[in-house]
Amino acid sequence: MSHSSGQEPAATAGAGIRLAAETWESLFRAQVAVMRQLQAAPAFKQLALNEYDVLFTLSRCPSGWLRLNELNDHVLLSQSSLSRLVERLEKRGLLERTPSPEDGRGILIRLTAEGRDLQKQIGREHVRDIADLVVPALTAAEQKELLKLTAKLRASVASR
């Protein structure tokens, strides 16, 4: 039966909502299970996963410097938690902060040589740990499909 109004019957809409919720729950629970395994890996004995996330994000910045608020857009932490974490990493000599020359109020952050070395060291181990979890579970074709689907979901959410 065709619906020229473009609206779904209530039963179909309800099924769509349930499927979306089940899909989200499955994605979330898979991510939590994987993250728990990764956090317990030897790679994160020197540095917590959220600290590594900051180093990793900074390592991918072409200029080497990122504003604190830009860094906040890329990590899963509140602004206040990120500020405290950045202070701890700076005290450990893994990154440095400087006032933004553009406005003086913003803070620019970059890795130190020690921070870059630690990020690379942990990163090599972390990638192996990821592969140890993902490769036995998903074929290469499934990994590519999952990559495509998660990118599509992120792009849709970002465009809202």
Image (cartoon, rainbow, N blue to C red):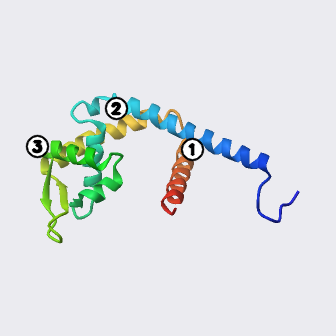
Instruction: State the residue position of label 2.
Output: 39
Left or right of 123: which side holds 99? left
Residue 132, position in %: x, y? 42, 33
Q: Secondary structure at mark 2?
A: helix
Q: Residue at x 88, y 56 (%)?
A: 1
Q: Mark 1 or 2 closer to N-term?
A: 2
Q: Amino acid at mark 1?
A: Glu
Q: Are marks 3 and 2 in contact (CB under 8 Å)?
A: no
Instruction: State the residue position of label 3.
Output: 91
Instruction: State the residue position of label 1.
Output: 142
Tell me if residue 114 comes above or below residue 39 in the rendering. Answer: below
Closer-to-camera residue (149/88): 88
Closer-to-camera residue (26/18): 18
Residue 119, position in %: x, y? 23, 45
Q: Amino acid at mark 3?
A: Lys
**Which residue occupies the extreme bottom position in the image?**
102
Q: Are marks 1 and 2 in contact (CB under 8 Å)?
A: no
- Alpha carbon separation for disc pair 1 and 2: 24 Å
- Alpha carbon separation for disc pair 3 and 2: 23 Å
Left or right of 152: which side holds 74? left
**Which residue occupies the extreme right position in the image?**
1
Q: Secondary structure at mark 3?
A: helix
Q: Amino acid at mark 2?
A: Gln
Q: Are marks 1 and 3 in contact (CB under 8 Å)?
A: no
Q: Residue at x 35, y 41 (%)?
A: 127
Q: For mark 3, does the 10 Å Cα neighbourhood hold few (<14), some (14 to 19), or many (20 or more) residues?
A: few
Left or right of 159: which side holds 97? left
Residue 5, position in %: x, y? 80, 65
